[in-house]
Amino acid sequence: MIRVRFAPSPTGFVHVGNVRTALFNFLYSKKGNGTFVLRIEDTDVERSKRDYEINLINDLKWIGIEWDEGPDIGGKFGPYRQSERVEVYRKYAERLIAEDKAYYCFCSKEELEKQKEGAMKQGNSPVYVDKCRNLDIEESKIRIKKGEKAAVRFKIQRNIYIEFKDMIRGNVKIDSNLLIDPVIVRSNGIPAYNFSVVIDDSLMKINLVIRGEDHLSNTSLQILIYKAIGIKPPEFAHLSMVMGPDNTKLSKRHGSTSIFQFRENGYLQQALFNYLALLGWSPDNGKEILLKHELISAFDLNKVSKSSAIFDYKKLQWMNREHIRLMNDEELGNVMTSFLEKRGIKFNHEIETFKWIGQASKVLSNYKHLLTEISEDFKEFISIDYSKELIKKIKDSETSIKVVSMFFEEISVLDSPIEFSKVAEILKKIQVQTKIKGKELYHPLRIALTGKESGIEFKEYIPIIERGSTLNIEPCVKNMKYRLMAFLK
């Protein structure tokens, strides 16, 4: 049975590159009816915070990633926070020491720094010189009992090649002589990443590790630790990095990078889910707009590219608009509420209101892609900013003011809301009576109704303001009668 995991550190807001890794794990496990585990690697005691963990969990849930085992829901292989598993790591470290596969290292930070500086001066890589590798274990234990602080280092087997097959990158081969004896338990008793991750993955029965290529250098070392504790390593699949449009590592200078920022900026969760799933992979049919169940069904880890994935913000914005159009009106209206409330727009939470908000948002999505932008454009339905130049332009034209006045006369006797079919009928009547048509007919009305010379088509705009004016929205939506009365006064 497939068992995969996502194991983030709660040291800040979750980056989209990490979420892409979580997403690929999720898709692969769901496609194969496997188990997806969320594990929190919080052994960085200075930087890890529970608030970050809460935010991380909320962000993953918001985007649509669910797990089968984790710190919030439990599971038979818990606990799922590394900070709660320190005793487990200690026992394995003691076992490796007893089997002469690890040793105590008494080197101070100052000594290690001098070693590093000396190696770099000679043009060599800063490596550990194995000073404590061959210390007598009993003497080391005596020193520990006397209160000396010591880290635990893993003893790398020399003069061998570590080989493994990566599901994305193919065969990988590393010379063990290029590896230094790594610290697996720090002098404060806290385990190091390369040790704790092996113990956790083995005890949690993880049989495939899908993670970023920045971990590729750790894999050979971890395989040696697996073998040292007598456990078969899992399979590995290392995903390419997510890069910015300039082909450098995606960072804040490119734009939003955290799920929180994308959410605040008005991206739909299903759009971001869809877009991240296609970073480095695409379905055989080439389709780009896919819903969650379609992505699960189509996902194929064997077809993930080893080339870097470029994060294209414009492509994501386009995808966001496409997903806006796929939503039903009521659902979209519900999503829009928080953005509208931030703009000072208040309304009763009724189905008809939500449907209207959804309909209006879809119309505005023809011009804007993000929910924040769409919420800003709602002012078109509420307030009208007539410039003196445009008012003068219409009122100084005998033809233009005639069209506006005749149209107002016709609608002033009608009950609101006025259907667009009636509007079309009135415009046809005016055209017949005055012989005015085309731009000379429509342009004055556009300016009088919207305060703009261009914008949303009448067949979409008029139904929105007419229907919206009957709903309990504050500030109220202005219908045609109100707008023309204000314009003509």
Image: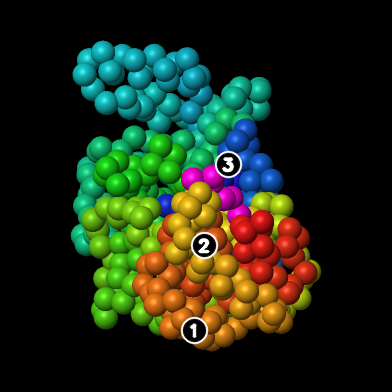
Q: Position of residue 108 (x, y in %)?
A: 50, 19
Q: Position of residue 199 (x, y in %)?
A: 52, 55
* SS state under label 3: loop
Q: Is residue 156 above or below residue 139?
A: below
- Between circles 3 and 1, the one closer to the viewer is 1
Q: Which amino acid does label 2 sit on?
A: Ile
Identified at 54% across, 61% down, the residue is 448
Q: Name the residue under label 2.
A: 401
Identified at 54% across, 46% down, the residue is 387
User: Residue 429 got which mark?
Assistant: 1
Q: Which amino acid does label 1 sit on?
A: Lys
Of 137 and 443, nearer the camera is: 443
Query: How far is mark 3 from mark 1, CA to CA?
Result: 68 Å
Q: In this view, does 451 lie to the left or right of 302?
A: right
Q: In this view, does 321 lie above or below 418?
A: above
Of 450 and 263, nearer the camera is: 450
Q: In this view, does 60 lie above or below 480?
A: above
Identified at 21% across, 52% down, the residue is 173
Crowding near pointer 1: few (<14 within 10 Å), some, many (20+)?
some
Of 388 and 147, nearer the camera is: 388
* SS state under label 2: helix
Question: In which quadrant of the rendered image does the C terminus lie?
Answer: bottom right
- Quarter assignment of residue 77: bottom right
Give the residues drawn in magenta, as a range. 384-389
Q: Which amino acid does label 3 sit on?
A: Thr
Query: How far is mark 2 from mark 1, CA to CA?
Result: 16 Å
Q: Mark 3 points at which residue?
A: 11
Circle 3/circle 1 CB separation < 8 Å: no
Comes first in the chain, label 2 or label 1:
2
